[in-house]
Image: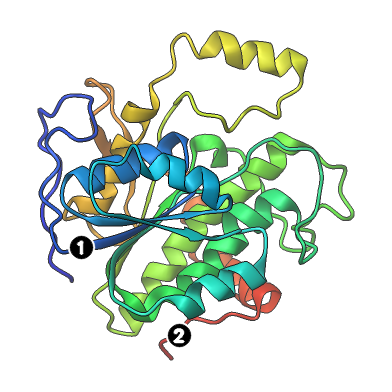
């Protein structure tokens, strides 16, 4: 297993920068880093010495965000809803990357398709990151961290209709399916890495109830509920802690991390039964390879 530079101290305060070990000499890619959890993740890692690449759809927004990041940064364009964009990003990459943080996502959006014809939540949250990870894996030296969600609990993954072409579309169910896919992806990725003898770990994290812009597409009733919920939600800074924990702590492969009850400090989280199903994980992987025409690069 690859060596790790350490982890967050158990008594660290809620600030994502406090207690983070030094990351000097590391390059970290954070997708969706122009705001929310991704930006907080980028800030904390850069402040700890990492060179952080903000992989964003809107490079102007990414450059504005980078101005608030206290350290070495780089902004590169990446649209996870476009396999062509994912390929361009990967083809332009030319150096080792310590950590790939698959953070970007969309949630609870009306039914629409990516340019490749995928349902946009499954296409962005899962398939875009699936393709990006497989294409960049030859460069990854330590780990891949994928931001999932406890919305996966109770979700159903339809391998026969992942793009909601035959089912009645429900935005929240589609989001839950994409987050279940994130955890199954992590599970199967770790199995493949182990089988190939690669010293890279695949991990997942969820922020808990964090106040971000993800639910801006909710309707008026659910939007009002979300607005009320924000009064008790964790800040984006606190929401980034599980991702940072997964990115820096010496954890076993396929671990799932979330906020704990003690000041929200990260700890291992429980998956649903479906999210721990190795057969379903392998079937999703095979489907993802067919849909993206991207394969695991190591045999």
Residue at position x 76%, y 54% in the image: 119
Residue at position x 87%, y 42% in the image: 168
Q: Quadrant of the C terminus?
A: bottom left
93 or 275: nearer the eye? 93
Q: Give residue 174's mark.
A: none
Hey, which residue is sitting farthest bottom in the picture?
A: 299
Give the residue number, with chain letter if any, for mark 2: 297
Residue at position x 66%, y 74% in the image: 292
- Establish if 152 lies above or below 291: above
- Establish if 217 lies above or below 204: above
Image coordinates for residue 263, horizontal then vertical, percent: 23, 20
Give the residue number, with chain letter if any, for mark 1: 26
Image coordinates for residue 30, horizontal then vertical, percent: 40, 53
149 or 129: nearer the eye? 129
Residue 206 lies left or right of residue 225; in this view the side is left
Q: Earlier in the sequence, mark 2 or mark 1?
A: 1
Image coordinates for residue 25, horizontal then vertical, percent: 15, 64
Q: Quadrant of residue 191?
A: bottom left
Residue at position x 28%, y 75% in the image: 96
Q: Is residue 206 visible?
A: no
Element under label 2?
Answer: loop
């Amino acid at each position: 297993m690859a060596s790790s530079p350490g982890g967050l101290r158990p008594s660290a305060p809620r600030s994502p920068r406090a207690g983070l070990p030094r990351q000097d000499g590391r390059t970290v890619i954070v997708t969706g880093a122009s705001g929310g959890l991704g930006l907080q993740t980028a800030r904390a890692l850069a402040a700890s010495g990492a060179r952080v690449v903000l992989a964003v759809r809107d490079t102007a927004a990414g450059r504005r965000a980078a101005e608030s990041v206290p350290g070495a940064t780089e902004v590169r364009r990446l649209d996870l809803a476009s396999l062509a964009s994912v390929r361009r990003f990967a083809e332009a990459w030319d150096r080792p990357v310590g950590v790939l943080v698959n953070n970007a996502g969309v949630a609870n959006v009306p039914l629409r398709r990516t340019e490749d014809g995928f349902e946009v939540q499954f296409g962005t949250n899962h398939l875009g990151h699936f393709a990006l990870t497989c294409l960049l894996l030859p460069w990854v030296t330590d780990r891949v961290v994928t931001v999932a969600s406890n919305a996966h609990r109770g979700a159903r993954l339809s391998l026969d209709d992942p793009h909601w072409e035959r089912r009645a579309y429900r935005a929240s169910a589609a989001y839950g399916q994409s987050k279940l896919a994130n955890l199954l992806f992590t599970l199967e990725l770790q199995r493949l890495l182990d089988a190939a003898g690669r010293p890279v770990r695949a991990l997942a994290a969820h922020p808990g109830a964090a106040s971000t812009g993800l639910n801006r597409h909710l309707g008026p009733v659910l939007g009002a509920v979300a607005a009320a919920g924000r009064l008790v939600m964790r800040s984006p800074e606190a929401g980034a802690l599980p991702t940072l924990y997964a990115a820096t702590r010496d954890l076993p492969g396929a671990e799932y991390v979330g906020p704990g009850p003690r000041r929200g400090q990260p700890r291992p989280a429980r998956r649903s039964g479906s999210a721990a199903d190795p057969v379903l994980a392998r079937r999703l992987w095979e489907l993802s390879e067919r849909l993206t025409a991207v394969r695991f690069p190591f045999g």
